[in-house]
Structures are given as C-alpha cells and as structure tokens.
C-alpha cells in the first residue's frame, strides 16, 4: 500500500479577534510510486512574511529508506516538485525530526536529525546550504526516535536509549 504525505488541516487565526479559526481542506504534498511516511514539519519563525516552510519525511523503496525534504515558500499553498534526498544510500534511515532556530534576521538555521540503524545522524542548514551527513551519536546502545527543538544556544536533541530518554 502506497502512502503519501497530506496536510490534513491548517488552522488560520484571525489576528484581529483571536477567536475565529478556519480549517483548510487536505492537500496532497508527495506523489509517485514510493511510500512516504513519518512527516516532520517546520515553518518560518519570524518575521511572518518569511514564509519558507520545510517538510521532512521518510521515503521507503525496495532496498531501504531515505530521509527526504520538500519545500514551499507561499504559506504551503503549493510545494516544489523537487524532492531533496538528505541521505544517499537507502540504508535504514527513519524517524526524521526538523527544527528551525532564528539567530537573527539574516541568520536562519535548521537542523535535521534521524535514526540511521541504531544511531542518530544529523545535517545542519546555514546560509542556504545543507551540510554533510554526520553522526550525532555512536556506540553500543540502540538509539531510536530522535526529536529536535531550537534552544537559546542552538538546538537540543532527545532520543530513546535502552528504555530511557537521553539528551
């Protein structure tokens, strides 16, 4: 069964009243023969007219899975056709998490983390360039289900390790 990523609802807040919400209909973002699952979404933090948004997801194929990104710059009305492959080997790459941190108007940074076999890997975005894939963790313990968030000094990542939460 093929899966696609769909935005199921977008709530728009009318700033003038804060009491009126509007739900938009679902919009299919990914298409094709691949199975796309495990979406992670990050939007512009500030200012609101910088309307760049990114979607990370796992794309399964017949030999493994890749972490991919799609991009929009019009408040998610339309999405680029281009799929950016953040991994290039179709190994076991799953559970992406994506965060944006704002270090100033001209210094937008993002960090993408994911589970690769039993470790956590990441790629860092700065100055409109994604850096190389690097391990965040390494060792004998199985690390799964990473999640990342912006912090005052950069980014913070948590994951499951031996039935516990690690940072």
Image: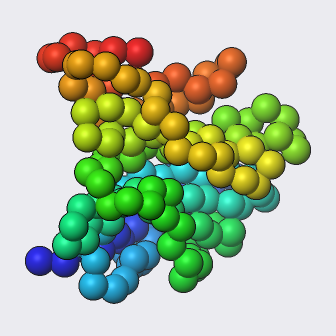
Q: Nearer the viewer, residue 78 or 108?
A: 108
Q: Give the image location of residue 3, x and y in percent.
A: 23, 73
Answer whether residue 21 is visible to the viewer in this image: no
* Residue 86 horizontal side relative to residue 165, left or right: right
The quadrant in which residue 2 appears is bottom left
Q: Is residue 32 above or below residue 92?
A: below
Q: Residue at x 33, y 85 (%)?
A: 32
View extreme (bottom): residue: 32
Q: How is the image coloured?
A: rainbow
Q: Give the image location of residue 7, x and y in percent.
A: 39, 67
Q: Residue at x 51, y 37 (%)?
A: 134
Q: Residue at x 67, y 72 (%)?
A: 74
Answer whether residue 76 is visible to the viewer in this image: yes
View extreme (left): residue: 1
Q: Nearer the viewer, residue 92 or 41?
A: 92
* Residue 154 horizontal side relative to residue 59, left or right: right
Q: Give the image location of residue 68, x and y in percent.
A: 45, 62
């Amino acid at each position: 069964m093929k899966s696609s990523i769909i935005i199921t609802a977008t709530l728009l807040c009318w700033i003038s009243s804060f009491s009126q919400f509007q739900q938009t209909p679902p919009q299919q973002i990914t298409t094709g023969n691949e199975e796309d699952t495990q979406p992670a979404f990050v939007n512009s933090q500030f200012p609101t007219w910088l309307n760049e948004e990114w979607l990370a997801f796992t794309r399964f194929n017949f030999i493994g899975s890749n972490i991919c990104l799609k991009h929009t710059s019009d408040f998610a009305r339309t999405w680029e056709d281009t799929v950016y492959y953040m991994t290039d080997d179709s190994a076991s790459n799953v559970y992406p998490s994506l965060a944006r941190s704002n270090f100033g108007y001209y210094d937008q940074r993002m960090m993408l983390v994911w589970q690769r076999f039993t470790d956590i890997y990441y790629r860092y975005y700065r100055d409109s360039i994604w850096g190389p894939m690097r391990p965040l963790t390494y060792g004998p313990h199985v690390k799964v289900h990473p999640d990342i968030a912006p912090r005052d000094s950069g980014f913070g990542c948590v994951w499951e390790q031996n039935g516990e939460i690690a940072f």
